[in-house]
Image: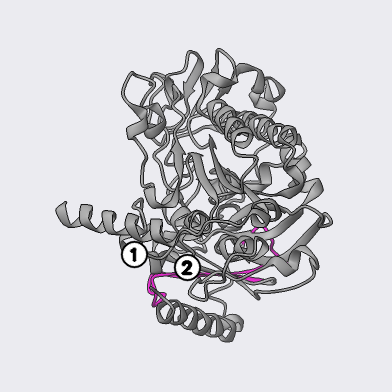
């Protein structure tokens, strides 16, 4: 503990000494950064990505002004590894964060994304979850009288000028609640933890964490509009529990009108055991009614989160600095809503590894970009757009050219990992290759994304695909070798 305290003290001295004051012209000329991230959000739930049931007008409005990426991928398919990766600028196996810890011990005095901006004169703050924070556990702290300001999850204090948390009642919120998971006889009460629970809650938006986050973010924008800022706004919905004010559930009632993804007999027969997700309709004991209610509750949480995004964007417009602020909207990873009878995150299928990503830069034309990008690319890209010094050490790529030319390709594939499954993904335009263990000893999956975009037929064991599988194994080995050669 003494060594850790000394290490942190030295880093604080280092970062204070390296912070550069801005000249008067830089204070007015540099872009602000508004980074909005939702938790456990699949792109398939957004109307700007084609969902016709769940309407997200405020996120759609950002997309209407920005570049919407259709092939954006996270680098870790659950919260901790993904967030540590895009905030540090390194892949999960370089940060060493394969669970829920902070990357600081591994990255040492190297600046995280927001810290790089802070070191160059920006006010850098977060509201709620940017690095990993337990949901619902971390959000409940404060709602029961404890000091929520002392709960910061796996946060990194060096990354921020200030940081703020947003407590809420979560699954304990008064209203109509039901536990859907592991409750086939309906006798289990509403419970906490990482459990599928739907609550149509009493009260208004600001009873809950995301409502409080929107209010605080609006306050910070108004307070810091006269200086350059990097503001991270972390919404925790639609992460379980699916709790939101009652009015957001109304468009999805009755829940039995929700349409489930197609179910294929024997869907799991041709995939290796690690490829079967950790949450399934079977092991969650969710019948069709509960599955449909899970989708309705998830959509209600998305609609609630979208309304809070609208409040933050309204505050940005009111501040008078929208025309000098880069706005980014994304999620830490995707989410299954019954595809293949899978639920939640962790898998390497597109629904879990793919993410929504919208980047809006003042003065640039709106567009749709179908080229591959990774969340890891945000750090170097936004630093470049804001004129900050380039850091060659970062493992992400500068994709700012795509904002002017959406046909530009910087990557020929996206790479993601599922540490819980010891799995790796190489996602090319025509093929998706999934491998379990670095030597593929626990199995592989290969999908023809042109003929089989929903990934129902694993081709990995077919003799006619042997050469392709060998080629992908070699590509994966080369990718992993490069990551280690370019690690910390």
Q: Nearer the viewer, mark 1 or mark 2?
A: 1
Query: In this picture, is 108 found above or below 313?
Result: below
Quarter of the image holding residue 104? bottom left
Q: Is residue 474 on the magenta stretch?
A: no
SS category of the residue bearing label 1: loop
**Residue that appears at 39% across and 52% down:** 158
SS category of the residue bearing label 2: strand
- On the picture, is 139 further left or further right than 308? left
Q: Label 2 neighbourhood size at 10 Å, few (<14), some (14-19), many (20+)?
A: many
Mark 1 or mark 2, which has the lower sequence index?
1
**Residue that appears at 68% across and 25% down:** 252
Q: Position of residue 360 (x, y in %)?
A: 73, 52
- On the picture, is 221 further left or further right than 442? right
The C terminus sits in image quarter: bottom left
Q: Which residues are magenta?
A: 431-456
The alpha-carbon separation of the residues under discs 1 and 2 comes to: 26 Å
Q: Position of residue 355 (x, y in %)?
A: 61, 53
Residue 483 numbered tag = none
Query: In this picture, is 302 found above or below 389?
Result: above
Pick whichever, 23 or 472, lies toward us: 23
| Tally of numbered tags | 2
Q: Position of residue 479 (x, y in %)?
A: 49, 79
Work out which residue is located at the far front of the displayed protein and give it: 24
Q: Label 1 neighbourhood size at 10 Å, few (<14), some (14-19), many (20+)?
A: few
Residue under circle 1? Answer: 108
Query: In this picture, is 366 found above or below 425?
Result: above
Residue under circle 2? Answer: 424
């Amino acid at each position: 503990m003494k060594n850790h305290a000394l290490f942190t003290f030295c880093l604080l001295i280092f970062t204070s000494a390296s912070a550069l004051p801005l000249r008067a012209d830089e204070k007015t000329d540099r872009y602000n950064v508004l980074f909005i991230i939702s938790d456990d959000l699949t792109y398939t739930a957004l109307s700007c990505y084609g969902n016709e049931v769940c309407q997200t007008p405020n996120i759609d409005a950002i997309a209407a002004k920005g570049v919407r990426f259709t092939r954006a991928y996270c680098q870790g398919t659950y919260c901790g590894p993904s967030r540590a990766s895009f905030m540090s600028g390194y892949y999960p196996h370089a940060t060493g964060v394969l669970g829920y810890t902070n990357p600081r011990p591994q990255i040492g005095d190297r600046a995280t994304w927001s810290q790089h901006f802070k070191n160059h004169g920006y006010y850098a703050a977060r509201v709620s979850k940017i690095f990993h924070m337990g949901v619902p556990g971390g959000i409940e702290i404060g709602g029961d009288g404890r000091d929520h300001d002392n709960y910061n999850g796996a946060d990194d204090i060096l990354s921020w000028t200030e940081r703020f948390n947003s407590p809420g009642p979560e699954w304990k919120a008064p209203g109509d609640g039901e536990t859907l998971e592991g409750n086939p006889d309906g006798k289990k009460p509403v419970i906490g933890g990482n459990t599928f629970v739907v609550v149509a809650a009493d009260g208004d938006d600001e009873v809950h964490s995301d409502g409080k986050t929107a209010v605080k973010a609006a306050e910070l924008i108004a307070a810091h509009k006269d200086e350059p800022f990097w503001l991270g706004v972390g919404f925790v919905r639609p992460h379980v529990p699916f709790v939101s004010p009652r009015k957001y559930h109304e468009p999805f009632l009755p829940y039995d009108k929700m349409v489930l993804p197609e179910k294929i007999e024997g869907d799991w027969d041709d995939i290796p055991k690690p490829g079967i997700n950790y949450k399934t309709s079977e092991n969650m004991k969710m019948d069709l009614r509960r599955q449909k209610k899970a989708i309705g509750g998830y959509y209600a949480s998305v609609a609630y989160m979208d309304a809070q995004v609208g409040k933050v964007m309204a505050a940005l417009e009111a501040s008078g600095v929208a025309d000098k602020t880069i706005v980014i909207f994304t999620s830490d990873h995707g989410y299954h809503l019954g595809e293949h009878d899978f639920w939640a995150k962790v898998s390497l299928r597109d629904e879990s590894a793919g993410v929504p990503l919208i980047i809006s830069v003042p003065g640039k034309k709106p567009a749709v970009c179908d080229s591959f990008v990774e969340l890891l690319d945000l750090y170097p890209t936004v630093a470049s757009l804001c004129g900050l010094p380039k850091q060659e050490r970062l493992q992400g790529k500068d994709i700012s050219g795509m904002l002017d030319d959406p046909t530009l390709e910087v990557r020929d594939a996206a790479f993601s990992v599922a540490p819980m499954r010891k799995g790796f993904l190489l996602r090319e335009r025509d093929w998706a290759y999934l491998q379990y263990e670095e030597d593929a000893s626990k199995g592989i999956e290969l999908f023809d994304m042109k003929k089989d975009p929903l990934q129902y037929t694993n081709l990995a064991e077919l003799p006619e695909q042997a050469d392709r599988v060998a080629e992908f194994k070699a590509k994966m080995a080369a990718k992993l070798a490069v990551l280690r050669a370019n690690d910390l």
